[in-house]
Image: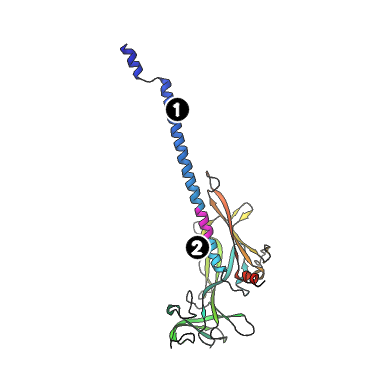
Amino acid sequence: MHATRRRRLGVTLVELLVALTLAAIVLGSATSVLLRQQRTAAALGSSVATDAQLRGAAGALAAELAVLSASAGDLQAGEARDTALQLRSLVTRGVACDDGIGVTIVADDADESPGALDGVVPGVGDSLWWYAGDSTRRWRSARIATSDSVTAPCSLTSAPSRRARRLALGGADTVPSGAPLRVTRQVRYAFYRSGDGSWQLGMREWIDATARFAAPQPVAGPFVMRSGESHTGFRYFDAAGNELPIGPGGVDIARVARLRLVVLIAAGVRALTSDSIVRDSVDVALARAREIARDD
């Protein structure tokens, strides 16, 4: 009788196998749920990163293109290609204080004067644009030879003198008092391979002292340059929505009304078990195209 009780205090082989099976099922289910949660979190993180890369690339270009003048030539001829785009970047704007031949005075932004500079200080080699109020009704331009901070009177204000900026031009052009001013600088957006081997979208500013573009400053990335039939880069469209061909000399800039930025990004969005290539794009209309549409 005592021997029988001792045998019942233990477990049989069948009971042990059942317990181990149940434990394996519970642990397997818990592990599966944990892995799914980790993969979902990774996928969401990749999706956010993908959106951030596109916003970074598109935001920089949209800010540049949105302020381009309706006058032709804001895009550099021969430099509008599938992987690079050169344009006139707006540095600052203001209003001419007085009439000047080969020179103009514009109020300093620090004094919050009417027509004061709005943006970065102009530099040597930048282009000064002023709207001619004559019969031509066109924007004219000249290279800035010197850019100095001065104290000078301004007919736009009642104060006898103000902090101002004196911009000497590389010619004898007349800038009339009250003329709207824009200062632009050549910049180039291009996809380039960085030191770690990844592809980035970078921006290079023209440096007049060295007569060349500066080293690229990363704007967004990394990107996948090509996957199958798709590739990262720029596309150009005319006012009718037709895509413009990109030849050896770039695209015909006179016909560009809209630009599309297409990016390919490696991200685990669709396939949670492995990385996938995500394609996204954004369109930006040039200011000239919007003004033509309003005139029509």
Residue 199 makes an appearance in the image = no
For disc 1, the marked residue is: 21
Q: Residue at x 58, y 70 (%)?
A: 87
Provide the secondary structure element on which disc 2 rests.
Answer: strand
Left or right of residue 247: residue 100? left
Where is 173 relative to 225, above or below?
below
Instruction: Identify the residue at the far top of this view.
Output: 1
Amino acid type indicated by mark 1 = Thr
> In what quadrant of the picture does the C terminus appear?
bottom right
Left or right of residue 198: residue 295? right
Q: Magenta stretch containing residue 51, yes or no?
A: yes
Give the class, few, some or many, for how many residues have Cα within 10 Å of label 2's Cα (few <14, many ≥20).
some
Magenta span: predominant SS is helix
Q: CA distance from mark 2 to mark 1?
A: 55 Å
Q: Which mark is residue 234?
A: none
- Snapshot colouring: rainbow
Where is 2 relative to 59, above or below?
above
Provide the secondary structure element on which disc 1 rests.
Answer: helix
Instruction: Identify the residue at the far left of this view.
Output: 2
Comes first in the chain, label 2 or label 1: 1
Give the class, few, some or many, for how many residues have Cα within 10 Å of label 1's Cα (few <14, many ≥20).
few
Q: Residue at x 32, y 16 (%)?
A: 6
Specify the segment rendered in magenta: 48-56
On the image, the x and y values in percent for residue 20 come to: 42, 27
On the image, the x and y values in percent for residue 187 come to: 54, 70
Q: Magenta stretch containing residue 13, yes or no?
A: no
> In what quadrant of the picture does the N terminus appear?
top left
Amino acid type indicated by mark 2 = Pro
For disc 2, the marked residue is: 218
